[in-house]
Image (tube, rainbow, N blue to C red):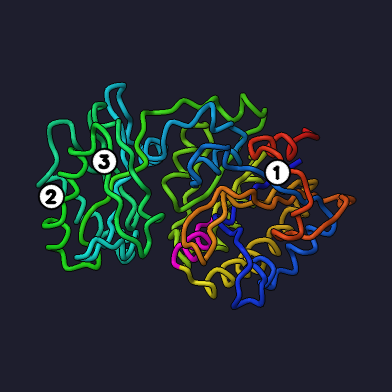
């Protein structure tokens, strides 16, 4: 038996007036997904436990079968693991976005105009040269997503994720470590602005100490691999002992290589992996941008470029089971994450499920199950 987990990041949404009261999932042309739902099982999952911030760190930890309430220590240390940045016991990691903030304090763009990875690396290098030292170090990531490692006494602060502030006044850090964070963010403006890009400063958030996850193979009895363009998901793989397969055309944006990720899945399963997770960020980015057209297009890309050829390829490998769900909702009207339960789908090569409709409305009558229990449902026949 082969197992596949598909994560269209942030694809769940709310009814949109421009779509005549439908959600992007209801409006998108997704015949393959529809057929899988009719022969499979659908339901609702709380991938974000009560009291936890809705984010991909929490949601994807749930999807991998780990209860975030037990294992989550913060977003940034997971990303640090994905970048190969080891944290000592007296260190914490912060997510360090390149952002654009207007003169009046409005968060214009949490992604700083989506700078290229190479040009962003030059900015981060300059930040390290000008502002690093005394236990503070900047680490370059992908596009606008970077890291800061600092001494452990920088941990205690209340920081708002920048994507929660899109088009709104910036809410600056509060708490014991806030003066250090504020001083560093203020000092970053002259460094970042000197490069002439859309971004004009850094934003620090998502801090935490290094977490410990039990190895996936010991927890579930399966060898696993995944592909993603996002350090956060890569980090979860590293922490759980899951092989991370790099796809050169994976960008974390609308133009990502859907086919490359699909083929990486099939190749890994053919080579002996028991389970493979495909993570694609495009639906989440469209939600944050408030771009309804791109969100619908990304869903249709999932159906046409991933799910259709994927299920055909899986049939050639033998019996299979597939789980599909987002790690959280990212409504285009809100442009940020919510903690609302998300729809999930289980389907397999045999069919014979009760059937249903994969959409927010289609699963509304279903009871809500904890997200971290779905991995067990997926592999229950193992």
**Main structural element of the magenta stretch: helix, strand or loop?**
helix
Q: Is residue 250 left or right of residue 317?
A: left
283 w.r.t. 318: above or below: below
Which residue in the structure is indicated by mark 2?
A: 187
Q: Position of residue 97 (x, y in %)?
A: 30, 52
| Visible residue check, residue 140 | no
Q: Position of residue 36 (x, y in %)?
A: 78, 58
| Disc 2/disc 1 C-alpha distance (Å) | 48 Å
Which residue in the structure is indicated by mark 1?
A: 3
Mark 3 or mark 2: whose residue is earlier in sequence: 3
Residue 258 is one of the magenta-drawn residues: no
Q: Position of residue 103 (x, y in %)?
A: 19, 65
Few, some or many C-alpha atoms within 10 Å of disc 3 (few <14, some 14-19, many ≥20)? many
49 w.r.t. 355: above or below: above
Q: Which residues are magenta?
A: 280-289
- Which residue occupies 23% across, 34% down? 177
**Mark 2 secondary-structure assignment:** helix
- Which residue occupies 59% across, 59% down? 11
- Which residue occupies 51% across, 66% down? 333
Residue extending furthest top?
A: 89
| Disc 3/disc 2 C-alpha distance (Å) | 14 Å
**Residue placed most toward the observer, 253 or 99:** 99
| Visible residue check, residue 14 | yes
Q: Nearer the viewer, mark 3 or mark 1?
A: 3
**Residue placed most toward the observer, 260 or 167:** 167
Q: Which mark is residue 148?
A: 3
């Amino acid at each position: 038996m082969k197992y596949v987990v598909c994560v269209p990041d942030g694809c769940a949404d709310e009814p949109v007036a421009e779509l005549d009261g439908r959600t992007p999932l209801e409006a998108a042309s997704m015949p393959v997904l529809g057929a899988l739902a009719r022969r499979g099982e659908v339901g609702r999952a709380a991938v974000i436990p009560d009291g936890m911030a809705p984010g991909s760190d929490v949601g994807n930890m749930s999807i991998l079968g780990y209860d975030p309430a037990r294992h989550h220590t913060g977003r940034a240390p997971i990303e640090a693991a994905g970048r190969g940045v080891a944290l000592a016991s007296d260190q914490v990691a912060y997510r360090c976005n390149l952002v654009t903030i207007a003169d009046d304090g409005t968060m214009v763009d949490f992604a700083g105009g989506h700078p290229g990875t190479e040009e962003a690396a030059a900015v981060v290098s300059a930040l390290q040269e000008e502002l690093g030292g005394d236990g503070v170090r900047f680490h370059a990531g992908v596009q606008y997503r970077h890291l800061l490692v600092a001494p452990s006494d920088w941990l205690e602060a209340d920081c708002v994720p920048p994507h929660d502030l899109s088009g709104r006044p910036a809410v600056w850090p509060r708490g014991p470590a806030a003066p250090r964070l504020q001083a560093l963010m203020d000092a970053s403006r002259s460094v970042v602005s000197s490069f002439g890009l859309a971004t004009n400063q850094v934003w620090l958030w998502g801090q935490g100490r290094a977490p410990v996850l039990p190895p996936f193979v010991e927890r579930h009895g399966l060898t696993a691999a995944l592909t993603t363009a996002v350090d956060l998901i890569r980090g979860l793989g590293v922490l759980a002992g899951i092989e991370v397969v790099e796809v050169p055309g994976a960008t974390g944006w609308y133009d990502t290589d859907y086919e490359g990720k699909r083929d990486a899945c099939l190749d890994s399963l053919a080579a002996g992996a028991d389970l493979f997770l495909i993570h694609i960020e495009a639906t989440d980015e469209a939600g944050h941008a408030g771009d309804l057209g791109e969100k619908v297009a990304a869903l249709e890309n999932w159906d046409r470029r991933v799910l259709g050829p994927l299920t055909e390829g899986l049939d050639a490998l033998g019996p299979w089971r597939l789980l599909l769900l987002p790690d959280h909702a990212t409504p285009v009207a809100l442009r940020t994450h919510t903690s609302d339960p998300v729809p999930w789908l289980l389907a397999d090569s045999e069919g014979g499920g009760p059937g249903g409709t994969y959409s927010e409305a289609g699963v509304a009558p279903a009871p809500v199950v904890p997200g971290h229990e779905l991995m067990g449902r997926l592999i229950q026949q193992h």
